Amino acid sequence: MHSITLELLGKTNVRGCCNPSAAGVLFLLCLGFPPSMAACPPSCLCASDIISCSGCNLSVVPFDLPGYATRLDLSHNRLTALHVGWISQPLQRLVTLILGKNFIRSIDVNTFNVTPHLLHLDLSSNQLTVLNSSIFSGLKELKELLLFDNQIIQIDPGAFKDLCNLQRLYLSTNRLSVFPLVIYEEPEGPLNLTFLDLSYNRLTKVPVQSLLSLTRQRGIYLQENPLVCDCALLALLEYWMWKQYPPLLDFRGDYPCKKGAKSGVHCKEHEMSAMPLETQIYQVEPGQWLRVPCPGLTLPAQEGLVVFWVTPTTVLNSSNSDLSARLAVLPNGTLEVREALTEDSGTYGCVIPRGHNYNPSHSLEVTVVVGNLSITSASGSAHRNSAENFNTAFTTLASCVVSIILVLLYLYLTPCRCRDGRGGDSRGCGGRAIILCSDPRDVETTQQRSNGKKVVFLEPQTEDSDTGCTKIAAVNLSHVTSEGILKNGSRTGWFTSRRTHFQNTP
């Protein structure tokens, strides 16, 4: 550092002028911030913030890497291990690290502390056999971890500690013979994990009860494993098929217990209802007991047959259920709820091997309501009522608008007076008529001329008919002017003229 400072001091004056670059570097050194002088490593390609050292036949990671990198590709090399201090400085900006297609056998604890903001880590196609405790410590922001195509046979407790934001984990094509439940049991582990690929391993059994709980909002891929098709696994696969579980639907041909392959199914069939199943509702008051039979099970479950119940809070089974507990599965497959609480309301599913795949429209679940059904569904009813009230108000408003438009059309756009075909006599109109004329040909006198329209209400006229009925004589309104009828939107003049006319009429 001292020699660098002296060298820079000698370069600050060039031909009597200050060198800005050298002065800036010297200023950073004086403040205690040594600048990053690392250039692109030899045989690597650098493009802006991307550094690619793929396929460079490297046996060690280039030590002096630029600190501005956000993506570092070290794949297709000859790396065998990652030790603490594998790079000279922390890569604070690095979000993607690719180490696939190497020969990595071991990774030291705290190796990744120098990449605290890493989001994607690719360790696929290496030679890892054991994932030691705290091997990924420091990667609290990691979201995707690729470990497929290794030789992993064991995952130690605490291996995924600190991976609290991990969402996708790829462990396919390894040598795992036991389902790694430890992944979900870590107190500081990947609680947000939504995708787990365990395909192409050596799993023969899976924890069905745990999977029923884990797969509610998670995708777990188990295809191409040598699973033993027993009753529990058959029940799980049938339930997943009814639920339209994507990992099973996408690879349904790569699972055991295939339909028609009876030789591989080690489960006794039992009598099930062939009728379509409909959702049933069970209502009970708080504090009371309730027994819910398994939908479709016509006879009590056979001895040794495991019946699973998926409740809103947990998963129970008949083989190890505590009969003294508040929620328990009886040996015959019936669910018993003791001293029901409001929190027990919800959907309950019965998982049992049925021998065939049910239509998704059929229900293998029941609804339990603790308390008043109307109160339980009050929120839904309130939502529907609000929508109905809105529709009613909208309809009423639309009706009012249409009524106003019709009234205006009636007052101002009524057709002109009708004519009788017999000499132009207006008596053919009959009854009450409204005359709106703007055509001069429809005006008989100059007093009936106006720039706008005129409205004249005609009383029924009297004339002798063949039946002898007498009609009231029509009122002569020839002297009433349109100015008295339509003037500034007021009819005061018309009513005055009309009243005067009636008074002068004998």
Image (cartoon, rainbow, N blue to C red):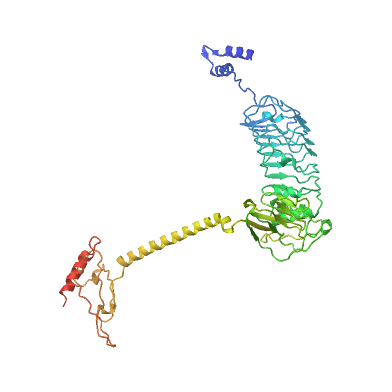
Task: Say which quarter of the image contains residue 97.
Answer: top right
Query: Which residue sits at x=55%, y=54%?
Result: 379
Q: Nearer the viewer, residue 259 or 325?
A: 325
Residue 448: x percent and y percent?
20, 69
> 33 above or below 211?
above
The number of discs equals: 0
Left or right of residue 25: residue 57: right
Q: Nearer the viewer, residue 190 or 306?
A: 306
The answer to whether residue 243 shows anywhere in this view is no
Residue 211: x percent and y percent?
73, 48
The answer to whether residue 313 shows anywhere in this view is yes
> 477 above or below 13?
below
Left or right of residue 444: residue 308: right
Residue 382: x percent and y percent?
52, 56
Quarter placement of the N terminus: top right
Quarter placement of the C terminus: bottom left
Left or right of residue 40: residue 377: left
Query: Which residue sits at x=17%, y=72%?
Result: 501
Task: Say which quarter of the image contains residue 393.
Answer: bottom left
Residue 132: x percent and y percent?
76, 34
In this view, the residue farthest toward the right is 263
Q: Nearer the viewer, residue 326 or 409?
A: 326
